[in-house]
């Protein structure tokens, strides 16, 4: 299986900060990568697919980049609604796998 | 708008069985491949199983192969997960999640999720 590793595991930031989360794959996955946001007690929400294609309704302060084995999710100016846990997921091949998550908390 | 609703979770003894359901009557259910994804308490997300829109093709993570069976009844707009020989490590919130495509052979991101149903395996 393809292993996905996110860093950091926890990130403390303030409203207005630029935030970057990294996701690394154990083998090349091309651009078959999605990002999700999950808030406590809620289902995950799809933010973007194919590394950087934003889902409808997702604010433009979210962006993604990368290819192959290294990817980043960037929030350009952190907003109060953005404090949550973020997961990357590869869909190049089964078994589909997620990163372990990055919790973005208030500094 | 898609609104997936899971049911069937509960407390079961190790070795027991449970069947989860996921339904939504607001979209053309048969047009989309579906999945089950779980999340153990305080842990991350783990994909469990996928099924094509027709139900002809299924996929499983290794840890549930031979124990879990995914199926669907498109006439009832319902997805199922039959879970047998349950173990403590199967304890999790189970989400159904939709692919944006009919086929499951080319996986995608999960574009809609249910609210989840809790499965607890304990003696």
Image (cartoon, coloured by chain):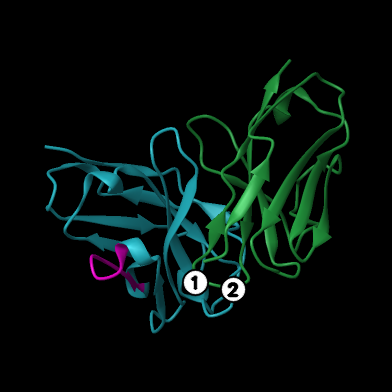
Chain colours: A green, B cyan
Q: Which mark is residue B77?
A: none
Q: Which mark is residue B33?
A: 1
Number of residues whose C-alpha sits closer than 10 Å to that of mark 1, classed few (under 14), some (14–19) or many (20 or more): many
Q: Left or right: A100 with respect to A104?
A: left
Looking at marks 2 and 1 on the same chain, the residue that comes earlier in the sequence is marked by 1
Percent coordinates x, y for residue A7 in the rendering: 69, 40
Q: Residue furthest top?
A: A107
The boundaries of the magenta stretch are B64-73
Label 2, on which residue?
Answer: B101
Marks 2 & 1, CB-CB < 8 Å contact: yes
Q: Left or right: B110 with respect to B76?
A: right
Q: Secondary structure at mark 2?
A: loop
Question: How far is mark 2 from mark 1, CA to CA?
Answer: 6 Å
In the picture, the quarter occupied by the C terminus of chain A is top right
- Comparing A5 with B113, the one in front is A5
Image point (12%, 53%), residue name? B15
């Amino acid at each position: 299986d393809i292993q996905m590793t996110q860093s950091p595991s926890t990130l403390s930031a303030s409203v207005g900060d630029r935030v970057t989360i990294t996701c690394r794959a154990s083998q090349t996955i091309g651009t078959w990568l999605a990002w999700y946001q999950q808030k406590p007690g809620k289902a995950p929400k799809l933010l973007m697919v194919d590394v950087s294609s934003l889902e409808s309704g997702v604010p433009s302060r979210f962006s993604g980049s990368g290819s192959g084995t290294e990817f980043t999710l960037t929030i350009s100016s952190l907003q109060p609604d953005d404090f949550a846990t973020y997961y990357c997921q590869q869909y190049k091949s089964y078994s589909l796998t997620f990163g372990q998550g990055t919790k973005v908390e208030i500094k | 708008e898609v609104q997936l609703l899971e049911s069937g979770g509960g407390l079961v003894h190790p070795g027991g069985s449970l069947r989860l359901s996921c339904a939504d009557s607001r979209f053309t259910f048969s047009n989309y491949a579906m999945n089950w994804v779980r999340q153990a308490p305080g842990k991350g997300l783990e994909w469990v199983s996928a099924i094509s829109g027709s139900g002809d093709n299924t996929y499983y993570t290794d840890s549930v192969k031979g124990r879990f069976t995914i199926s669907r009844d498109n006439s009832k707009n319902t997805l199922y997960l039959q879970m047998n020989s349950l173990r403590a490590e199967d304890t999790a919130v189970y989400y159904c999640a939709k692919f944006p495509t009919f086929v499951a052979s080319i996986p995608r991101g999960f574009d809609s999720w249910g609210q989840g149903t809790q499965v607890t395996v304990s003696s």
